[in-house]
Image (spheres, rainbow, N blue to C red):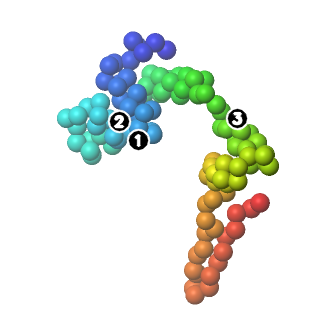
Amino acid sequence: MKSKELKDSHKAFADEYLVNGFNATQAYLKAYPDSTEEAAESSASRLLSNAKVKEYIEEQKKQIKEDAVMTKREKLKLLESWILDREERKSVRLKALEMHNKMTGDNEPEKIEHVAGIQVNYNKPE
């Protein structure tokens, strides 16, 4: 789809939605600054269901992914090579391990819940 098919305001909304981390309400407020927050919530939802806007956003996401310098898999492989390289400085290996853990979610804390005075631990599966 050519961006010409979208209204300028719809394109502005979609572009801001992509840039701000997919916050539709904030994207709507930026594209339509005279809108109230309450109106922005419902109008943003409506715009996200608009076929042309949806298609434009998906095309932009695809383009962003294609333009990425490295994929997540490539980044993980690079970090793994640094972690396992015994010739690499220890500080570099530890930082690589920390970044790898963040990317894979291994640094997330265990969930601990107290139910009726009993502590229940949820451990992440290995």
Residue indicated by mark 3 = 74
Q: CA distance from mark 2 to mark 3?
A: 31 Å
Can residue 9 be seen? yes
| Residue 84 position in % (x across, y down) | 79, 48
Quadrant where the C terminus sits is bottom right
**Which of the two residues, 107 or 96, is positioned nearer the viewer here?**
96
Q: Is label 1 in a helix, a strand or a loop?
A: loop
- First of labels 2, 3 by sequence position: 2
Q: Is label 2 in a helix, a strand or a loop?
A: helix
**Which of the two residues, 95 or 51, is positioned nearer the viewer here?**
95
Few, some or many C-alpha atoms within 10 Å of disc 1 (few <14, some 14-19, many ≥20)? some
Identity of the amino acid at label 3?
Glu
Identity of the amino acid at label 1?
Asn
Identity of the amino acid at label 2?
Ala
| Residue 77 position in % (x across, y down) | 74, 39
Few, some or many C-alpha atoms within 10 Å of disc 2 (few <14, some 14-19, many ≥20)? many
